[in-house]
Image (tube, rainbow, N blue to C red):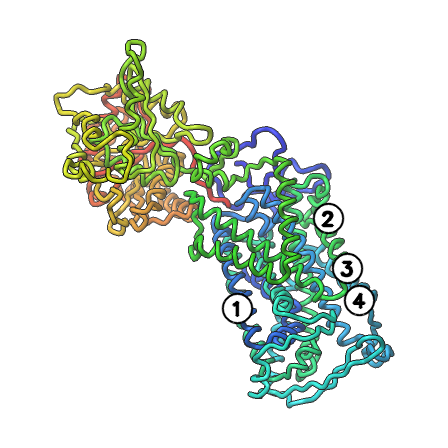
Amino acid sequence: MSNERTPLINSGVCGLSMAVATCGTVMDTPPDSPPGTRVKSKEPRKLNTFFGVMVPTILSMFSIVLFVRTGFVVGHAGLLQGLVMVFVAYIIIALTILSICAISTNGAIQGGGAYYMISRSLGPEFGGSIGLMFFLAKVFACGEYVLGLVEAILDVFGRDEETSISEGIHVLPQGYWYTVLYASVVLLLCLVVCLVGAHIYSRMGFGILLLVTVSLLSVFISSLAVKPQNFVIAHAGPGNQTLRYNASYTSFNLTTLKNNLGSGYSLDYSTNTVMSFATVFAVMFTSCTGIMAGANMSGDLETPSVSIPKGTIVAVIYTFTVYLLLFFLVSATCDRTLLIEDYGFLQRINIWPPFVTIGIYCSALFAAMCAMIGASRILHALAVDQLFGLPLAPATITTSSGNPWMAVVYTWGLAQCVVFAGQLNAVASLVTVFYLLAYAAVDLACLALEWASAPNFRPTFQYFSWHTCLLGILSCLVMMFVINPVYSSGSIVLLLLLLLFLHYRSPTSSWGYVSQALIFHQVRKYLLMLDVRKDHVKFWRPQVLLMVANPRSSCQLILFVNQLKKGGLYVLGHVQLGDLDSLPSDPVQQQYNFWLSLVDKLGVKAFVDLTLSPSVRQGTQHLLRITGLGGMKPNTLILGFYDNSTPEDFFLQDTAFCGTSAGQGTEGEYNFGVDLPSLQAHFPPVRHVESPRWLTPEEYVGIISDAIKMNKNVCLGRYFFHLEGEGKQSKVDGSERTIDVWPLNLLQPGCRDYQDVCSLFLLQMACVLNMSSKWRHARMRIFLNVESESSDQGWVVNEETFRELLKKLRIRASIKIVPWDSVVQHYTQTGGEEQSHTLNDQFLFAVNSMLMEHSSQAAVRFLYLPRPPAHPSSSQMYLGQLEAVTNGLGPTLLIHGVTPVTYTDL
């Protein structure tokens, strides 16, 4: 298959495979990588949910904020506003997590994390621009965490700012350039670890998590064990002045808690700027930028679609609980001066200060490494996809174990530039704005997939909707401008410039475009944007041409197919017999208004296409070839069943067509010159038993053969006049309905392949029906026929394989095992080319009896339609077999699929 990790194709038509995809078998780097690229196919995935997602996400969300900026937030904002910040931040990330979980459980995810999700959902233009900005956000975050670590190191080992004399452990000189030097050393350490690989990084992560947990426990224990204390805190002031502050630790004290409830924004001693809600929230939100730490490791996870949602949700709940407890603890034990003037106050009030020191160093160092390795994975994915050409080409180079070491070096070089900012708080706003924009893009990707309503968008994670996606987008954009309007405007301008750049490069990919699915809903306005070269199996939907001889007897089938189309093209086709050479004018043109009025009356979303032809078969060929425009052309032909039963007149049953309502529906409504009596008079009465047929059995079977030759799927509908509740006024939701699916070719017992194209197409059509409004709550049952008494017990393995297939396809259905040894014993097989068409009556009766026994109560049945015979002389026998098998069943759809429509990847 054409895999999802293929680079963009600069010219020509991208090869689209229509085969059924399976998860986890794609290479992380394309076979046609640039020269010098070292590729390892099928890179081993080593990390599970805990080590690959939970550990990096927890530590990234703790980062430097947990130990060094908790007091900063509570001191300036107060407990109440601090809690508001926490809740707002976690609501934003919770909405984004819902989108991440939905996308990540809709198929296999490869390396690149958030970039992979966005690009494979929104296409290369948006994915590439957001991916680059998300990479920059990670780079700035890496620099921020390193600066925070250096700040914590200088708090313990830095010389006194007043005397600049080394005393005891206070040996490190302080100053701007010294800060840059120390940050460069720490970055070099991160570089070495990240060059070793993700497995070393994950192993370190577990040990660091244990140390951070011990440090956290010591903080909570110290609040009970340490007695009240007073401190004198000194800071360098303007000129050569030294500012001293008296601060106190009161242990748990109700007065302290009351004093810390309200806000008290003042001067930040690290940047000498007055804080506000926006600036404090920007610093606080950096603790929430780690939710994609696990997603960014998607290329190293064993089962990304399971690990990412589960690990991320657990990690977020855990960190949320810790932050709430810590906010209440510091608010009740420390006065505001201590919180504002000493960001490392937790070391002062700990039973053993090195506990907190170790926690700060470990969490900050790991967060920096996490940001660096996450950024390198995103950059590597961008480079592999060849979105930005030669500048990123070296980033495709990997080690023999698959570690993108050149991307790591790129990331390290850019992070080195960030540390020149000198202070953590100085870059916090920019980091937060970039992350919020990336989160909004993830929500937008999920929103686009949800609004596209593609049949193959069936994530196993169901706790999301387009409302949560839209709310996530709006909340991210609003908070961006609340934090810093200048940075927000600049980031959006940069995003637009990148979009234009990638758009004019006109990249072509085989990833599939959600835009191609969305355009179906705006086809009249955006028809020219549809491009058949960008079609992808993941966005496949039924595009139906339903051939209608007389609407009077076909209305129930028309209404049913309207539920089956799943937002795709739906065309009612009709062939008027005649020869234009012998007529003064085209009689078809005058009929369109009547047919369109019929569509309005029935309330179906369908187009109408009529043709004039000497025969029905030739006219159907014309319609199959010329119906539709561009990417909107029928891929499925549906016919009524050919039998000798007398059709019923639907116009006499539906009140919308009855004469008593002739005056209704016309007031205040333009009927385009077709009133109800005219509509009734236009369509002839239904056929009687003695009436001549418009087409012969040979011609009918020939139509089926023609459609298959033209690579069109074929469905035959029988007994749909028995189906009720399909009208637009019906309130049926399908809760009392059952959909039965028989994926095996019942007329050829020797065939046991449940995964051929026809069977998978049949399953897809049943699933599409189950997703429609009137069938949404219907139960789907899939019947597997087995020869239980046979010596060959391979059917047990086939059953397990089929269950796994349904799981991959996200199809919810119960599986029923049906032994049919008693049926097969009647099967006789003779030699010759037409062996599948020489079946005895006992076998056909036995098959029908089996169907009646198991599916007599179903609302609709989906059966496998065998390929029609090659010789016209067998047409009557073929139809007789189909009639015998479906005799007395009720609404039944016989389906023969020729195009792959299922997809298990993202």
Q: Is residue 207 visible?
A: no
Residues under labels 1 and 3: Cα distance?
A: 36 Å
Residues under labels 1 and 4: Cα distance?
A: 34 Å
- Does label 4 or label 2 sit earlier along the sequence? 4
Foreground residue among 406 and 100: 100
SS type, badge 1: helix
Do labels 4 and 3 touch, CB within 8 Å? no
| Image spot of residue 447 (x, y percent) | 48, 50
Residue underneath mark 3: 188
User: Compared to 420, does 558 lie above or below?
Assistant: above
Which residue corresponds to the image point at 72% horizontal and 37% vertical from the top-left?
35
Residue underneath mark 4: 179
Do labels 1 and 2 touch, CB within 8 Å? no
Q: Nearer the viewer, mark 1 or mark 3?
A: 1
Do labels 4 and 2 touch, CB within 8 Å? no
Circle on res. 812: none
Q: Nearer the viewer, mark 1 or mark 2?
A: 1
Residue underneath mark 1: 87
Label 4 CA crowd tier, 10 Å (few <14, some 14–19, many 20+): many
Residue at far left of view: 690
- Does label 1 or label 2 sit earlier along the sequence? 1
Which residue corresponds to the image point at 77% horizontal and 73% vertical from the top-left?
154
Residues under labels 4 and 2: Cα distance?
A: 27 Å
Residue at far front of view: 668
Q: In the rendered structure, which amino acid carries the disc numbered 3? A: Leu
| Image spot of residue 446 (x, y percent) | 49, 50
Residue underneath mark 2: 406
Q: In the rendered structure, which amino acid carries the disc numbered 1? A: Phe
